[in-house]
Image (cartoon, grey):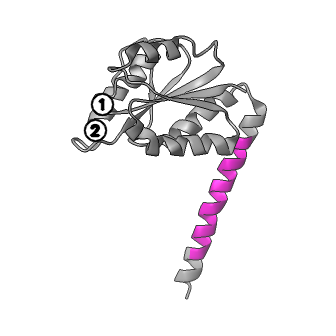
Amino acid sequence: MKKVGIVMGSDSDLPILRKAMDTLDNLGIPFEAHVYSAHRTPEQAREFALHARENGFGAMIAAAGMAAHLAGAIAANTTVPVIGIPCKSTNLDGIDALLSTVQMPSGIPVATVAINGAVNAALLAAQIIAVSDEALAAKLDAKRASDAAKVLEKDAALQAELAK
């Protein structure tokens, strides 16, 4: 199975990325995680991205706040799909990171999820890998069915409460 590369611009992003890691763990998807900054450690970030395919990565997740150039820096150095997570900051509530992550120039795509959207980033990475992995696709189908069943249980409980 292909693995997912996770890069965070700062260890302060780790609480957000733990949700992605937990999601990947629950699906049985291997991952590798690093703290690399697009601005403070550009060479390390570049090297990680340049060798992503040969190192077995099927998707990359990059999370950063504020200027949030990390996803774009990773995407500029690989053709492995990159998913950006804009992280909420104290100054502009993550809107700055969202705009930095989503506004990529033509030719360097970055899929972008919601601010702090680590679970969806992990699920999107899983879906990318599942294109060529039937067992993983089945796990994703089962997760969707389980999630739907939980919502229907909550609806049934609400209907029972309202019928009183």
Answer with the quarter of the image where residue 108 lies: top left
Circle 1: residue type: Leu
- Residue located at (52% from left, 17% from top): 48
Q: Is residue 119 visible?
A: no
Residue assigned mark 1:
99
Neighbor class of circle 1 (other Cα within 10 Å; few <14, some 14-19, many 20+) is some
Residue 129: name its quadrant. Answer: top right
Q: Secondary structure at mark 1?
A: helix
Q: Residue furthest right?
A: 135
Report x, y in % for residue 61: 50, 29
- Who is closer to the viewer here, 41 or 121? 41
Look at 26% across and 34% down and name the residue there.
Answer: 96
Relative height, residue 51 to residue 130 (above, below): above
Residue denoted by label 2 = 95
Q: Secondary structure at mark 2?
A: helix
Outermost residue, left direction? Answer: 91
Disc 2 from disc 1: Cα separation: 6 Å
Q: Which mark is residue 42?
A: none
Does the segment drawn in magenta span residue 150?
Answer: yes
Left or right position of 56 against 98: right
Whether residues under marks 2 and 1 lie with C-beta atoms below 8 angstroms apart, the answer is yes
Tell me the chief SS of the magenta region. Answer: helix
Magenta segment: 139-157
* Left or right of 6 in this view: 152: right
Front residue of 68 and 44: 44
Specify the amino acid type for callout 2. Answer: Ile
Q: Percent from the top left, x then y, of residue 30?
A: 66, 33
* Place of residue 89 in the rendered image (x, y in percent of width and height, measured from the top left): 29, 41
Q: Residues within 10 Å of mark 2 (few under 14, many from 20)?
A: some
Residue in the image at 56% along x and 37% along y: 122
In percent of width and height, residue 85 lies at 43, 35
